[in-house]
Amino acid sequence: MTLLFNIYTIFPEIFPGFLGCSLTGKALTEGIWSYKTINIRDYAFDKHASVDDTPCGGGAGMIMRADVLGQALRANYKNGPLLAMSPKGKPLTQQQVHELSKNNEISVICGRFEGIDERVIEAYEIEEVSIGDYILTGGEQAAQIMFDAIIRLLPGVLGNNQSLENESFEFGLLEYPQYTRPIEWQGKRVPDVLLSGHHKKIEEWRKQQALKITAERRPDLLKKYLDSKRV
Ligand code: SAH
């Protein structure tokens, strides 16, 4: 099985970007995933190949035209999830990343300028996805981050499947603190419990630490976690 990303962009040269390095790069060479870029500009009609125009109703910046993007989709989109990277999308979660990783094909539109004409989003029932509450210059960067999160879940990408299981978000909590050798560094010792070899105590300590860190840093996650335990 292999996962294909169809990427609608006006900057195809941004891909594969950092996805061509390290574990995701190796997985690309091995054919575990692949990508195809569709240059939206190839579907422009006028002699300047314009893909954008000024916003109706006024305001700053430019908007990606529905007719040009619509034509690119009509010519290329077949099936599978159709997403657009957007700060006004639903925030991406690890759970959604797991669901996306089960597909054979995912299509993603990378916005530029001030975003995309709403009509094309409605017409193609495009699901908007945000990678966080901040603004980037383009959807390509956001798409690469989402792809990275998906690719590392594909079978054969990470050496040790265990490393997936205890990670932040996998259990609804942030990860506990981790240590390695040297046992003492700058007068600070690794917590004794981790050196005890007592697996049950280690597990309890890690759980307590995960709860403490999540309470301090992400009370929203802790609430969700506790609510889910109550049912
Ligand atoms: N005017 C828009 C922001 C446009 S930023 C707004 O206020 O919502 C330009 C493009 O970058 C967007 O179309 C989107 O594809 C991408 N982008 C920027 N921030 C993003 C984020 N947090 N998550 C996903 N995509 C983002």
Image (tube, grey):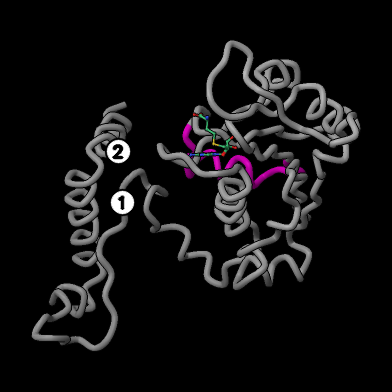
- Given residues 129 and 158, the one toward you in this image is 129
Quadrant of the rendering where the C terminus is positioned: top left
Residue at 56% x, 46% y is 142
* Image marks 2 and 1: residues in contact by CB distance under 8 Å: yes
Left or right? Give the position of 164 relative to 141: left
- Kindly identify which residue carries mark 2: 221
Q: Image quarter for residue 80?
A: top right
State the SS at label 1: loop
How far apart marks 2 and 1 lie (CA) works out to 8 Å
- Report x, y in % for residue 75: 91, 32
- Report x, y in % for residue 182: 24, 88
- Report x, y in % for residue 31: 78, 64
Left or right? Give the position of 227 relative to 148: left
Please give the range of residues in magenta. 91-106
State the SS at label 2: helix
- Given residues 227 and 67, the one toward you in this image is 67
